Image (cartoon, rainbow, N blue to C red):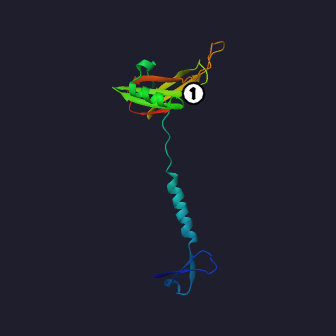
Amino acid sequence: MEIIRRKERRDGEKKTMWRRAREHGGGKKRRVGGIPKLLVICLAVCLNAGCVKRPAQTDKLRDISFTVIEHEAVPDELNALIEKKETSPFQLTYADQGSLYIAEGYGTQLTTGYSVEVNDLYETEDAVFIHTTLLGPEAGEDIKEISTFPYVVVKLEYIDKNVIFD
C-alpha cells in the first residue's frame, strides 16, 4: 500500500510529491514527478507525431474542358455577386443546372487594356485547380485613364470537388 503526500514550501516554490512505500521499510522517501512527467511528455510527442494533416493531392488527373463566357451569358445571381465584389480581388464558384461556373477578378485597375487569361484548369483526386493571370495593356495600345474591373468567368461541367485558385 502506498501513501502519497504533497509538501508545499512557504516561499512559493512549486509543490513536490513524495511517495512512501511501505514495502521498502516504511521510512524511505522517493521523489516522484521527474520520470512520470518525462514519460507523459514523450508519450504526447509520440502520439502527436501521427497527427499530420495530409496535403491535397495535386497530381493532375486530367485537363478540364471549359468555355470562357461573356458577361451577358453569366447567370444573373452570379452576375450580382460579381458586381458586388468587382472593386476588390475575388474568387467565386457557382453551380447551376449541371454546370459549374468559376469566376476570378483582380479588382480595380486604373486604366483600360487589362484582361484575364486562364493558364490552366485541371482536376486532381481531391479538387479542381484553376490558374489565371492578369495581363496588362500591350505596348503601344491606346489606353484611357478609366477604372476597370477585369475578371474572367469559365463554365464547365459540374464537378463535386473544391475549387483551388492557384
Where's residue 158, x and y in %? 37, 27
Residue 11 placement: quadrant:
bottom right
The one of 14 and 110 positioned closer to us in this rendering: 110
Instruction: Decide if residue 75 is on the left or right side of residue 90.
Output: left
The one of 72 and 103 positioned closer to us in this rendering: 72
Where's residue 129, x and y in %? 48, 30
Where's residue 47, x and y in %? 50, 56
Residue at image position (62%, 20%) is: 145
Q: Residue furthest front?
A: 146
Disc 1 is placed on an element classified as loop
Residue at image position (41%, 33%) is: 161
The one of 34 and 160 positioned closer to us in this rendering: 160
Where's residue 122, x and y in %? 47, 26
Residue 68 visible in the picture:
no
Residue ID for mark 1: 108
The amino acid beneath tag 1 is Thr
